[in-house]
Image: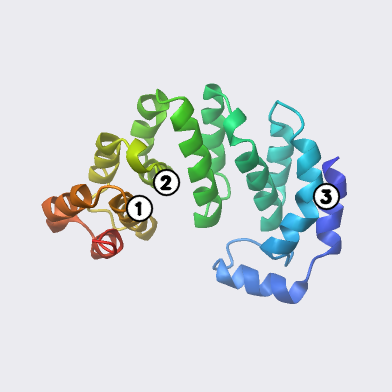
């Protein structure tokens, strides 16, 4: 069934747009040249049919990620985001694998939301996985551990957030420091005082990028 949508994507490729999209992503991946609105329009009926099954079609997800062009990876991520509430606790191992597969901020940030959805249903994952990820060598696992509570508002586990950030203070990695800033900025919309106190306490060890992003609404 995926051959139909794959072929549809190929028919709508645009070499000029593909070069622009690849340049925006620092030439880390080749692109077909299908921008998001068109990609989602092309995939709408296909995903609607695919989502009728209660079970996640993991072979489809893996097949998408085996393709070179980034739009196929986006297709798999759009599918997982749609079905994130159906993910089982044991699926976290597959998500961990995907976070580390052809990784860049665009794919990882989509999986951020998926992991967050899983945490709300399976809070035990905080101890079985998130606390391991925050200390992992892989920067993308670190990023997800820091940002997986984005949008949680009053449901934010401030202890988990504290641990994730403190485990990565002093990092020279841009994407980790950016994640710290985003997590603090997001939580400041709910608990401004907590974030202000956190930034003040940790300022000597925090990267200027994290401070700038985290203090935006203070």
Label 2: which residue?
A: 151
Q: Tell me the quarter of the image containing the N terminus.
A: top right
Residue 157 horizontal/vertical position (percent): 31, 35
Residue 106 horizontal/vertical position (percent): 54, 56
Q: CA distance from mark 3 to mark 1?
A: 36 Å
Left or right? Give the position of 195 relative to 175.
left
- The colour scheme is rainbow
Binning the other alpha carbons within 10 Å of mark 2 as few (below 14), some (14 to 19) or many (20 upward) gives some
Label 3: which residue?
A: 5
Q: Tell me the quarter of the image containing the C terminus.
A: bottom left
Residue 8 horizontal/vertical position (percent): 85, 56
Counting residues from the N terminus, which is met first, the one under dot 3 or under dot 1? 3
Vertically, is 205 above or below 14? above
Residue 7 horizontal/vertical position (percent): 86, 54
Q: CA distance from mark 3 to mark 2?
A: 32 Å
In this rendering, the label closer to the viewer, 3 or 2: 2
| Residue sitting at x 27%, y 38% | 158
Number of marks: 3
Find residue 91 and report its image quarter.
top right
Q: CA distance from mark 2 to mark 1?
A: 7 Å
Find residue 216 and report its image quarter.
bottom left
Residue nearest the viewer, comparing 33 with 116? 116
Residue nearest the viewer, comparing 148 with 169? 148
Q: Are marks 2 and 1 in contact (CB under 8 Å)?
A: yes
The furthest residue to the bottom: 16
Q: Is residue 68 visible?
A: no
Counting residues from the N terminus, which is met first, the one under dot 3 or under dot 2? 3
Label 1: which residue?
A: 186
| Residue sitting at x 51%, y 49% | 108
């Amino acid at each position: 069934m995926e051959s139909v949508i794959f072929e549809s994507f190929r028919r709508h490729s645009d070499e000029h747009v593909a070069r622009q999209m690849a340049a925006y992503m620092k030439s880390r991946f080749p692109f077909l040249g299908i921008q998001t609105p068109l990609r989602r329009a092309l995939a709408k009926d296909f995903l609607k049919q695919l989502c009728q099954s209660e079970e996640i079609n993991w072979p489809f997800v893996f097949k998408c990620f085996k393709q070179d062009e980034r739009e196929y990876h986006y297709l798999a991520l759009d599918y997982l985001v749609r079905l994130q509430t159906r993910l089982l606790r044991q699926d976290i191992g597959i998500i961990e694998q995907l976070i580390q597969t052809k990784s860049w901020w665009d794919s990882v940030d989509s999986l951020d939301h998926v992991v967050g959805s899983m945490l709300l249903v399976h809070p035990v994952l905080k101890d079985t996985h998130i606390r391991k990820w925050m200390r992992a060598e892989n920067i993308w696992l670190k990023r997800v551990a820091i940002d997986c509570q984005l949008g949680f508002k009053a449901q934010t586990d401030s202890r988990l957030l504290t641990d994730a950030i403190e485990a990565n203070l002093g990092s020279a990695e841009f994407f980790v420091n950016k994640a710290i800033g985003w997590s603090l900025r997001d939580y400041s919309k709910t608990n401004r005082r907590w974030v202000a106190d956190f930034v003040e306490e940790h300022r000597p060890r925090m990267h200027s990028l994290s401070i700038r992003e985290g203090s935006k609404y203070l």
